C-alpha cells in the first residue's frame, strides 16, 4: 500500500511540476497584445502631415471651382437680364458650364485618388513600423482592434496602443524630420 501511495504521490508531484512549468512557459511565451488601430492611424505624424497636404490640394481645387462658378453666375445674370442674346454669348456660357462640370468631375477623381494614395502610404509605413516594434519588443501577436469584431475583449495590460503610437511617431520623426 505504501508503494502505491508513494507512486501516486510521485506522479502527482511530477504532474504538478509539469503543469506549473507549462503555466510559466505559456505565460512567458504568450505575448499577445493589441492596439486600437484607429487611434494609432489618426495620431500618426505621417497621417497628420498627409492629411494637411490633402486638405491644401482639395482647397486649391475648390478655389478654382468657386472662381468658375462665380463667373458662371455672373454670366447667367447677364444672360437673364439681356433681351437680345447672340448665339456666341450662349455658346460661350455653355462652353464655360461644360468646362466647370468637367473640372468638377476631374477634381473629385483627383481628390479621391490622392486620398487613396496617401492612405496606402500611411498604412505601408505604419505596418513597417509596427512590425519593427513587434520584433524589437519580442511580441508574438499584435492584434488591431476596431471594436467591430476583430478583437472583442482584452485585458488592460494587453493594450499597447500608446507604446506603439509613441514608437511609430519617434521612428517617423527620426527618419524624416532630422
Image (cartoon, rainbow, N blue to C red):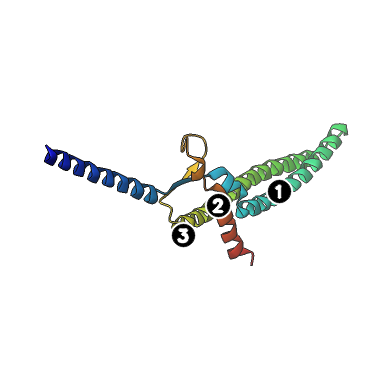
Element at label 2 = helix
Q: Is residue 134 visible?
A: yes
Tell me which label, 2 or 1, sits earlier in the chain: 1
Q: In front: 2, or 15?
A: 2
At 81% across and 41% down in the image, what residue appears? Answer: 70
Q: Nearer the viewer, residue 73 or 176?
A: 176
Q: Is residue 144 left or right of residue 56?
A: left
Binning the other alpha carbons within 10 Å of mark 1 as few (below 14), some (14 to 19) or many (20 upward) gives some
For the N terminus, the image quarter is top left
**In this image, 98 relative to 85: left or right?**
left
Residue furthest bottom in the image? 178
Q: Nearer the viewer, mark 2 or mark 1?
A: 2
In space, the residues marked 2 and 1 are separated at their CA atoms by 38 Å
Q: Which residue is mark 1?
A: 61
Relative to residue 31, is residue 39 drawn left or right?
right
Secondary structure under the numbered disc 3 in the rendered image = helix
Q: Which residue is mark 2?
A: 163
**Residue to which mark 3 is pinned:** 136
Marker disc for residue 29? none
Residue 116 visible in image: no
What is the C-alpha distance between the residues marked 3 and 2? 12 Å
| Residue 103 at x, y percent in the picture | 68, 45
Instruction: Calculate the distance from the C-alpha at mark 1 to the C-alpha at mark 3.
Output: 43 Å
Q: State the image coordinates of residue 173 (x, y, percent, origin top left).
A: 61, 61
Secondary structure of the residue carrying numbered label 1? helix
Q: Are marks 1 and 3 in contact (CB under 8 Å)?
A: no
Of mark 3 and mark 2, the one earlier in the sequence is: 3
Residue 49, percent from left and from top: 65, 54
Amino acid at each position: 500500500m505504501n508503494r502505491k501511495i508513494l507512486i501516486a504521490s510521485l506522479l502527482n508531484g511530477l504532474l504538478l511540476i509539469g503543469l506549473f512549468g507549462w503555466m510559466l512557459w505559456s505565460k512567458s511565451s504568450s505575448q499577445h497584445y493589441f492596439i486600437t488601430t484607429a487611434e494609432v492611424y489618426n495620431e500618426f505624424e505621417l497621417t497628420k502631415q498627409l492629411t494637411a497636404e490633402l486638405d491644401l490640394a482639395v482647397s486649391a481645387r475648390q478655389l478654382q471651382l468657386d472662381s468658375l462658378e462665380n463667373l458662371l453666375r455672373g454670366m447667367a445674370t447677364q444672360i437673364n437680364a439681356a433681351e437680345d442674346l447672340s448665339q456666341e454669348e450662349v455658346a460661350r456660357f455653355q462652353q464655360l458650364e461644360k468646362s466647370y462640370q468637367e473640372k468638377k468631375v476631374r477634381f473629385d477623381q483627383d481628390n479621391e485618388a490622392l486620398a487613396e494614395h496617401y492612405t496606402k502610404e500611411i498604412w505601408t509605413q505604419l505596418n513597417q513600423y509596427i512590425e519593427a516594434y513587434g520584433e524589437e519588443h519580442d511580441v508574438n501577436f499584435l492584434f488591431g482592434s476596431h471594436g467591430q469584431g476583430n478583437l472583442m475583449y482584452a485585458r488592460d495590460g494587453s493594450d499597447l496602443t500608446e507604446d506603439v503610437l509613441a514608437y511609430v511617431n519617434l521612428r517617423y520623426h527620426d527618419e524624416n524630420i532630422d
